[in-house]
Amino acid sequence: MWKIRVRRLFSWWSVPGWLAPFSRQIYQLINAASNADWVRQHVGLGAVWAFLSAHSSGVGFVCGISWLSYLVVRPEQVAGARRKRLRAMPQTVTVFAHDEVLKRNPGLYEQVKQFFKGVDWHVEVGLTNLPQHSTGVWLHGGDKPTRTLAFWMLRTLNIAAQVDDSDDDESLQVIVGAENVSEREYDGSEITQSLAERQLIRDYPTLVSERDALKWALEQTQKEREALRGTLANERDSALQSLARCQKDFAMARVEWFAQRSRDWNPQISVTVRFADYFDYRLALQIIAILQEHAGWTAELDQSNKPVLKPSEEFKVVFESGISQAFDEIAYAFGQGAFLGDVSVGRRTADRHDNHLVIEVLPTVRA
């Protein structure tokens, strides 16, 4: 410490302190070598100049001694020297190994010991079996700055040490127990999640705008799809109606063609429409009217139900021909042209040789 003070006495900062006691002689030299008397007479501070001339030696001596004393005992300089001295002094630590750590995890003890040796601390070793130190890493003894330094040094090893303040010893002790009481290893996930959340907050207006734009585009697409679906449905219905009309016209033409071709048959064609249920009466009349209009045939209406007409799950109207199947063309035209609407039309062949067409309107089973 005395070296620091001596060095400060002979530094450039000490020059004013050494020259101040000789201020009178310096003033006289300046006065003899320049026109200082003229300045003193014309400046107007005669009393000040007179005081300095009479007492310059004493004032300079006091000022010089004060300045040199301040340099010698300046607090920050002394504190800085103390800090340098503390840094230069090596720290001493005693690393105790608990019996449990030697049994279960001796690598932890070696890790702590080698760590303090690696930072140029003076390390002493010891053994202990105190129950309170069986788990975890403990700091015991030493002053508070040293304990704090050791605590944060252990944190670099991901070890959260605990402090034992009971009967503090003069030197620092690090007691290594069986388990490492530490926080989980930090992998940066927290800050990554925080940054992601902040980024989401910043991007939220943009995301909302994009969501609204996509929602509007989806609504427009749905409207266009519905409009296209309606257009296609209308076109489909129109096409189906046109197809139904064409099929009906073609079926009527086939009936008329068949009637024209069969005019000269011998014997002549006879038609009987049979039904058993009163509710089928109108359907029977409709069949007779179609044959009369497009084929020119007169049909006989038979409601005697002899032989008995039996219901069928497949057909409502059945066209029965002889073995020649001559009237299958008429049955096919009635089915293709949908003369009777949604009524299903079938064909049957009877064991007879004639030109008699029998049309049976089968009864419907009602619950």
Image (cartoon, helix red, strand yellow):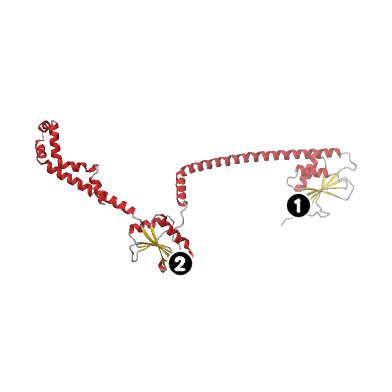
Label 1 crowd (10 A; few <14 / some 14-19 / many >=20):
few
Q: Which of 150 and 73 is in front in this view?
A: 73
Q: Is 2 placed above or below 222 here?
A: below
Q: Mark 1 or 2, which is nearer the eye?
A: 2
Residue at 57 percent of width and 40 percent of height: 221
Looking at the rendered structure, the secondary structure element under dot 1 is helix
Q: Distance between the residues labelled 1 and 2?
A: 106 Å
User: What amino acid type is highlighted by mark number 1?
Assistant: Tyr
- x, y percent for residue 49: 11, 37
State the image coordinates of residue 180 (x, y, percent, origin top left).
45, 61
Q: Which amino acid does label 2 sit on?
A: Glu
Q: Could you tell me if the residues under marks 1 and 2 are in contact, i.e. CB atoms within 8 Å?
A: no
Residue holding disc 1: 278
Q: What element carries label 2?
A: helix
State the residue at coordinates (21%, 41%): 15
Residue 356 higher or lower than 101, as above or below? above
Against 118, residue 28 (above or below) is above
Q: Is residue 239 left or right of residue 34?
A: right
Q: Mark 2 points at which residue?
A: 100
Q: Quadrant of residue 181?
A: bottom left
Image quadrant occupied by the C terminus: bottom right
Is residue 102 found left or right of 149 in the rendered image? right
Q: Quadrant of residue 259?
A: top right
Residue 150 spot, x, y in % from top left:
38, 57
